[in-house]
Amino acid sequence: MKLSAKKIVFAVVLVALIDFTFQYQRSADPVYLGRRLSEWLPKLIWGWPEEERAQAATAIATLGVKCVPFLLNQLEPQRPLLTQPLRDWFTTNVLRRPAVTGSGLSKELESLQKKIWTQRAFEILGPEAKPALPRLTELLADPITADGAADALASIGPGSLPVLRKAIRGNDVAARRAAARSLGKMKQCGPQAAQMLWGAVSDLDPSVRLNVESSLRALAERGEESVLAQARVLEHGPDPNLRYTSLYVLKFFNGASHSDAPDTGKLGEWGGANIIK
């Protein structure tokens, strides 16, 4: 069946608009030493020589806040776009060529790599990435992007604590779960992170409680003194969840020296939020 001239013209104009949009978005990709940020980011992860990883880190640090819009775009939900079906239709019906489809496995790998280098870039920027906080707060409420947003918030540092505090106390399970997981990574503000985590030990959702325990363990293993002090108070308290979690945390504190290690048999005796096998 032949396509009318109007349909062909419409398709050409539509694809041109799509391409213009893509080019416009690419213009937000800042440049350092002749390379775009999108070319530097992949060099932050494993597999690249140490010298190139260091150069990539320098590029991120030098570009500074200019990186934020592009990094936020990396965290946006990767849902199916209207543009791809239109491109496929144009390729098949106008250009008379088969549409090219990618591998699901390669997309998963690409998504994982993107998540890793985006988090690393936020770590490099640290507090300089504070302009990202409003959008990261919104992304934290989306189950698809909650984990990536929480990791970025943890990387930004103390400035993101109010956002994470609100998230871990809120009604959204995905946001609470993501905040609980990321708080264990906040080495630079351990006491504040520990306080928020202890407050979430008895969360009604098991997945949140599990992340709380894992994050408290992470802080304990790094020797965070505020975790130790609170655990030694709570291990004798009336709340079985708090008793259980405090013993669990003490078990791993700073490598669990013999003087710090609790009677782990009480873990099974008291039960608690999550029985660790």
Image: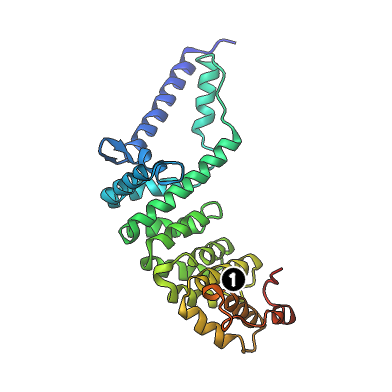
Q: Residue at x 38, y 61 (%)?
A: 156
Question: Which residue occupies the extreme top position in the image?
Answer: 2
Q: Which residue is the site of mark 1?
A: 213
Residue 94 to residue 69: above or below: above
- Residue 145 is situated, as x and y percent measured from the top left of the image, at 51, 52
Left/right of residue 82 with respect to residue 134 in the rendered view = right
Left/right of residue 185 with respect to residue 105 in the rendered view = left
Question: Which residue occupies the extreme front position in the image?
Answer: 258
In front of the other: 260 or 158: 260
Q: Residue at x 43, y 57 (%)?
A: 152
- Give the residue type that dot 1 points to: Glu
Q: Point out the image quarter for the C terminus.
A: bottom right
In front of the other: 9 or 155: 155
Q: Say which quarter of the image contains residue 10.
A: top left
Residue 103 to residue 65: above or below: above
- Residue 171 is situated, as x and y percent measured from the top left of the image, at 56, 68
Q: Residue at x 53, y 64 (%)?
A: 181
- Residue 66 is situated, as x and y percent measured from the top left of the image, at 29, 48
In front of the other: 35 or 138: 35
- Residue 224 is situated, as x and y percent measured from the top left of the image, at 46, 75
Mark 1, Cα crowd under 10 Å, few <14 / some 14-19 / many 20+, is many
